Image (spheres, grey):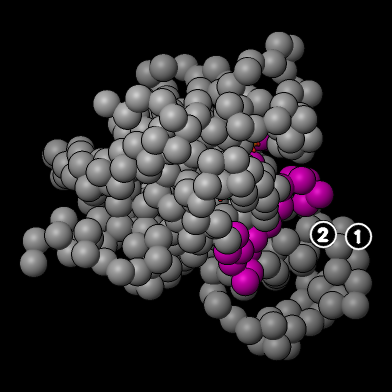
Amino acid sequence: MKEALRYYFSMKPRVLSGIQPTGNLHIGNYLGALKNWVRLQHDYECVFCIVDLHAITVYQDPAELRAKIDQTAALFLAAGIDPAISSIVVQSTVPAHAELCWLLTCVTPLGWLERMTQFKDKAAKQESVGDGLLQYPVLMAADILLYQARVVPVGEDQTQHLELTRDIAQRFNSLYGETFVMPETKLPAVGARIMGLDDPTKKMSKSETGAYHAVGLLDPPDLIRRKIMRATTDSLPGVDFDNLGPGVQNLLTIFQAFTGWTDEQVRSHFAGMRYGELKKTVAEAVVAGLEPIQQRYREITSEPGYLKRVLRESAERVAPIANSTVRLVKERMGIYTD
Ligand code: AQP
């Protein structure tokens, strides 16, 4: 059966998740989201988005953004997303995302948006706050509800936005009748919140520019080693599981998420280990975990036209699903559908 038909006739529940094409994807994005996606794609019908409309809620240099969109898509593939069974969609290429966002904006109370901690944090860093930043979680709700996704695999930082998505869906359903499936958040067992290497009290984030803050998915091995060797720990001499500081905890989480070791294996291997040795072990696990991704990334980006074809086919594949949801929502709201 042709790939597109196999997709349409799939009876699996749908998954939706996305990453902004801003900055450099880091191991937090990989362990909190991408790695989980790769596992889920065999049990669910998956749509993974490069959310460029979210990215422009704060100013982006246009040429840089355009390049990052392709880089992010290539990293999805390199991490193991299989375009024969999953769709990799650039959000702006499916106009229904923006259209549903507007329709949902009209049922979302302002107070719900003003309460969002990500909005408050990001707004506090800006001199002037654009309306797009406030609407960011409504656009995220639109991404999810557009595909009637049942499961949304994200890192812990997105759980409040997922709650809001459910609130918006519930409100729409109670105003206009049952329309949307209620999505569930799916956090990874290990790695839901990777912290900054330079400050383990803050989540690792693309928008933090410190040179030793994050390990990028495309960082060369020596840079990865240098960053991890510089990671902030504490003044204890070695790993004490009864007294773990946030920096050491973060390094152990990174190690465990990359290797898949159990809690018991981690405890017996690292108990009492000096921090220098711990860091070397973690660095080698990260280098080994990223090596095949970097290798595939080089292959994907050296194949002319491949990425464009994947993105075009994915957009064509999901557009009928997205358009039929928008049509249903417009019908329910009593506005023109054609
Ligand atoms: N530190 C993290 N640990 C675990 N999961 C994480 N995610 C992000 N950071 C971590 C998950 O990655 C997915 C994409 O998130 P994003 O595109 O919003 O990326 P970001 O790194 O949070 O980048 P930003 O938004 O550029 O940084 P800030 O927030 O500082 O402005 C999501 O599933 C997220 O949970």
Identify residue type, mark 1.
Answer: Ser
**Residue 290 located within the stretch drawn in magenta:** no
Q: How many marks?
A: 2
Q: Which callout, 1 or 2, points to the residue nearer the camera?
A: 2
Q: From which residue to which does the magenta span run?
A: 185-210
Query: Quick one: label 1, few (<14), some, or many (20+) residues within 10 Å?
Result: few
Identify residue type, mark 2.
Answer: Pro
Q: Quadrant of ligand 1?
A: top right
Task: Answer left or right for 27 relative to 327.
Answer: right
Residue under the image location 22 percent in, 59 percent down: 8
- First along the sequence among labels 1 and 2: 1
Query: Quick one: label 2, few (<14), some, or many (20+) residues within 10 Å?
Result: some
The residue identified by callout 1 is: 235
Q: Position of residue 218 (x, y in %)?
A: 44, 47
Q: Position of residue 314 (x, y in %)?
A: 24, 46
SS category of the residue bearing label 2 = helix
Distance from the alpha carbon under mark 1 to that under mark 2: 12 Å
Residue under the image location 27 percent in, 26 percent down: 338
Asked where in the image residue 78 lies, by quadrant, the reply is bottom left
With respect to residue 286, does 161 lie above or below? above
The residue identified by callout 2 is: 246
Q: Position of residue 335 (x, y in %)?
A: 41, 26
